[in-house]
Image (cartoon, grey):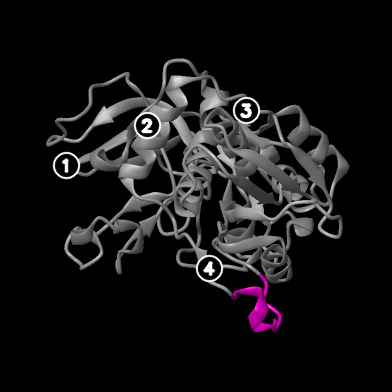
Amino acid sequence: MVLEKQDLLEHSPLRLKEVQIPEIGPSEVRIEISVCGVCRTDLHVVEGELPAHKLPLIPGHQIVGRIEALGKDVRRWQGGERVGIPWLFKTCGKCKYCLSDKENLCDNAAFTGYDADGGFAEYVVADENFVYSLPDNYGDIEAAPLLCAGVIGYQSLRATGLKNHGRLGLFGFGSSAHIVIQVAVHRGLEVYVVSRTDKELALAKELGARWVGHVENEMGVLLDAGIVFAPSGELLVDSLRKLDKGGRIVSAGIYTTPLPGFDYSLIYPEKCLTSIAHTTRENVRAFLKAASEFKIKTQVNVFKLEEANEALLAIKNSSVSGSTVLRIA
């Protein structure tokens, strides 16, 4: 499914096309794709909220498949292995961020389905060092949401500083939140969920939330930390109102609407508003290891490859709960 011009999903900008099977470089692997997750970031790319880096483009960055061909210098992998590819496609390995374990901030990073063709297709190529083994206790459809929704949620959870106790708020309850809530509950955190839709609140309650409600509702407690998944600057400010002193709000999105002005008392005393950007390879491996230790239930809505526009539109309109996946093969 190829994007030639950014446009509203209502205009079905993705087109089904026959393209050349991608050639592999010396250190790359080619993967025959089984499934690819569909993400709100894909929505921002397709509709133009994120500026185009490459057109035409094949989106998609939660890729699960099997290695079909190996570059001549590949040493880490063998043919036929099941692997996953997430958002981070490549880093320079030389800038100050790469040299200080912050490769997610690399000045010259490239991203799957944004700078390089991604997984809304039958084949994809990737550098052997940016491909990951997947936990055996997940099928392909279950594993796909782990590769972005899972790793971004996990990186956001780590950024809150909470370990195995405390009150965590989740603002927006889509693909990422419905995964991270299970990790948080498994670790002993009390989780409070804010969402616009009753079906998402019902899912949150089913997955172990201590409290669920809308942003205007009183929780009855103040939070030690919160993660904002919805791309709303207004919600970021509202989340600060529910935060205890010394607490931290983490914005998990790659895009959000502008933040309205707010009173200094919302960040005093010692409240922190921060963001996470992309992810590191270390974080991906750490999350996949955590996911292998117990079974995260991924609620998945499955669409066909040629239904990619409909899948993204369903995410845009919040007409699906949990994660969304395209079945390729």
Which numbered marker is on residue 272? 4
* Amino acid identity at mark 4: Cys
Q: Residue 204 in the image: state x and y as whole percent.
A: 74, 36
User: Is residue 111 or residue 248 the one in the foreground?
Assistant: 248
Judging by the rendered image, the residue that carries numbered circle 1 is 26
Q: Is residue 7 above or below residue 25?
A: below
Pointer 4 or 3: first along the chain:
4
Please report the residue visible at 62 percent of the width from the left and 47 percent of the height from the top.
Answer: 168
Q: Residues within 10 Å of mark 1 (few under 14, many from 20)?
A: few
Indicate the quadrant containing the C terminus: top left, top right, bottom left or bottom right.
top right
Q: Quadrant of residue 267?
A: bottom right
**From mark 1 to mark 2, how far is it between C-alphas?**
15 Å
Determine the secondary structure under disc 1: loop
Q: Residues within 10 Å of mark 4 (few under 14, many from 20)?
A: some
Please report the residue visible at 51 percent of the width from the left and 27 percent of the height from the top.
Answer: 143
Judging by the rendered image, the residue that carries numbered circle 3 is 298
**Is residue 261 located in the magenta-colored stretch of the structure?**
yes
Pointer 4 or 2: first along the chain:
2
Q: Is residue 223 visible?
A: yes
User: Is residue 68 or residue 95 the one in the foreground?
Assistant: 95
**From mark 3 to mark 1, how far is it between C-alphas?**
35 Å
